Each structure stands twice: as structure tokens, then as C-alpha cells.
Image: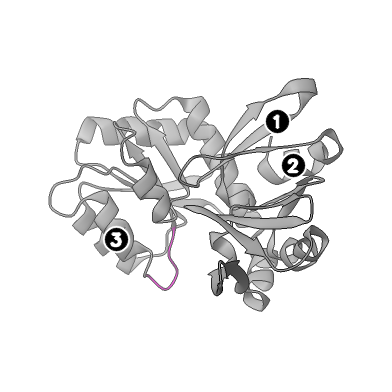
Amino acid sequence: MSGAAMRALVVDDEPLVRSELVYALGRVSRDIEITEAPDAVEALRELAAARFDVVFLDINLPGLNGLEATRVINALPSAPQVVFVTAHDTHAVDAFELAAFDYVVKPVSQDRLARTIERLRSSQSAAPADALGRGTLARVALEDGERTRLAKVAEIRYVQANGHVVTARLFDGDLRWKGSLADAATRLEPAGFLRVHRAYLVNPERVVEVEPFFGGSYLLRVDDKTRSEVPVSRNYLPAVRKALGL
């Protein structure tokens, strides 16, 4: 989206709530084109007719709900990012299982929305390089007990070294990485992963929260089942700030 307006589709069946979100988006981003839809069916019509960068989507919609609609959206040839905007936090796990970009609970503050927009812009500006990396390394082989699982690189939240054991965190648990953390860095950094600590590599697209930590550093929370925390060491702060737009 660098150099071009962000195209956003706002989907909510309550006109007042929808207009408030449109207003807030306009306040936090001057360079955004917004289309509105009152339900998921109309939203899918809009998505079939034009390309959008992001869909801000309510979950409790009449007829086809937001989670069901996202399954259809994810199957589109040029699928936009999906940001759920909902009054309830009870669907967060379901949302991130669908690879939602973000999950925002109403009422939405402009500061919270601004962080989402900044992350969207950062992820899109890095897309050409990331696309090349993911094209050459779409999957990796991970050990799952006596089996080998071929996991999508995009499914990996982070890779951690604990002594000589290296694991990759997926949505619902860890699998064994076949090799060292240095090997993981060589293979995953071209796909956009960040070295944030001597023992961690993180997929920045899976970071959903950043919390200040001791000594001016951060804790990163990722979108796995338990919202796992990843520490950032001071040596890697500049790269993390740049990548996450902090």
C-alpha cells in the first residue's frame, strides 16, 4: 500500500456503528478509501467486483456471520486482510484460527485503530520481499513425535531454542525444528521472520500485542491459542521497532 491509498471495506449491520468506524478510520489515516456494506453477502459482492487491502468485519451479522464470511474471503485469489471488529472477545481463538490480521473489541479507540493501520501498512510495504521468500520456502518439515509434518511457513508464530532443542510454535502447540536456530534463521529470515532475541525468531505477521518490558524492551504476544509471549532483547530493539512500526 506504500504510495497508494489503502482500500478498506467496512462491514457492520448497525448503520451508526458502521459510520463511527468509518469516521475513526478517516481520522487515523488520511490516505484511505472506504466502502461500506451492511452484511456479509453484500461485502462478498463488493469483494468480487473490486480489490481491497483490508476488510473490517463484524462477527455478529445477519445471515452469514463474520467467521463464515472469512472462510469465503480467504479463498479469494487476492484475499484482503481481515480485521474483526466486534463487541465480544469470545471469538478471538476462532478468528485467529482463520488467520485474521487483528481482532479489535468495540468500542474502538482511535489509538487502537491507528496501531492496526500502521501494522497493515508495514506488512504490505514488506509484501514483495516476503512474497519472494514464501514462494521459495512455502513449507518446512517439522517433527511431530514419530511423524514428520509439513507446515506452512505462515503458520509458524515463532521459533525458539532451549539448549539444543529447537521448536516451532504453531497455533495449538510446538513441533520440533530439524536443525539449529541458526539454520532456522537462514531459512526463515528471507521469508520475513525477525531475530528478536538470541533464542527467538518471530513471524511479525503473527504479533498481535506489544507490551513494554524491563529496561525499555518489549514483550511480544502472538496469535497462538494461548497468546504466548516472546521477549525482545535490547540488541534487537531497533530492528523490531522498524519492522512493527513502533
Asked whether residue 3 is in view, the answer is: no
Front position among marks 3 and 1: 1
Q: Is mark 3 on a helix, strand or loop?
A: helix
Residue at 70 percent across and 30 percent down: it is 218
Foreground: 188 or 69?
188
Residue 138: where, in percent of width, then height? 60, 74
The residue carrying mark 3 is: 46
Residue type, mark 2 in image: Val
Which segment did they paint magenta?
76-80
On screen, 136 above or below 37? below
Which badge, 3 or 1, comes first in the chain's sequence?
3
Residue type, mark 1 in image: Tyr
Magenta span includes 220: no
The residue carrying mark 1 is: 218
Q: Name the disc covering residue 240, or none.
A: 2
For the residues bearing labels 2 and 1, Cβ distance under 8 angstroms: yes
Front position among marks 2 and 1: 1
176 left or right, relative to 73: right
32 left or right, relative to 22: right
